Image (cartoon, grey):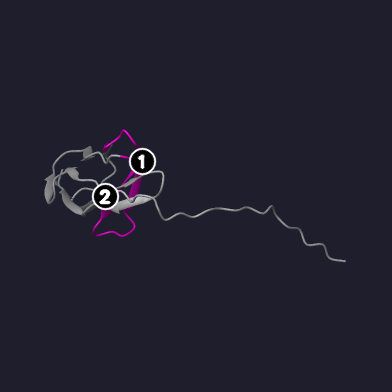
Amino acid sequence: EEVIASSDIWSFTTTSDGIILPAPELISPSNNITILNLPVSFQWAEVIGAVEYQLCVYNVDDENDRFCYLTGQDSTFWETSNLDNNDRYQWQVSARNEYAWGEFSYMWYFDTDY
């Protein structure tokens, strides 16, 4: 006789009354600027209620060169030297509260030339 094992039964609740946070306002690097030195410092405005931020950086010419960083609620700043020279990048940020990830910011662009 075949015995079929079963797992524990879990349950969850969904809600629709949470607040979706607005997009963070980007500060630097400015849109369409050329970066002449590494590291690159990313900065955005605090979003009230955020417990975490996600910064995503994309190499416009290389779809395999994309990365996202998670920062804590008190961190509206990230610095990296992990960028190629003579490339164009785009970046954006989203904030998360206890309910969900919020809206992504507008996409800003910059070029590297160092």
Residues packed near mark 1 inside 10 Å, few (<14), some (14 to 19) or many (20 plus): some
Q: Which of marks 1 and 2 is nearer the N terminus?
A: 2
Q: In which quarter of the image is residue 48?
A: top left
- Element under label 1? strand
Q: In which quarter of the image is the N terminus?
A: bottom right
Which of these two is toward me, 96 or 28?
96
**Left or right position of 92 against 100:** left
- Identify the residue under disc 2: 22
Q: Which region is colored magenta?
A: 49-78
Q: Quadrant of the C terminus?
A: top left
- Residue type at tag 1: Glu
Residue 87 visible from this viewpoint: no
Residue 63 image label: none
Q: Which residue is drawn at 21% across and 40% down?
A: 45
- Element under label 2? loop
Which of these two is toward me, 22 or 87?
22
Q: Which residue is drawn at 17% across and 53% down?
A: 109
Q: Residue at x 32, y 40 (%)?
A: 49
- Residue type at tag 2: Pro
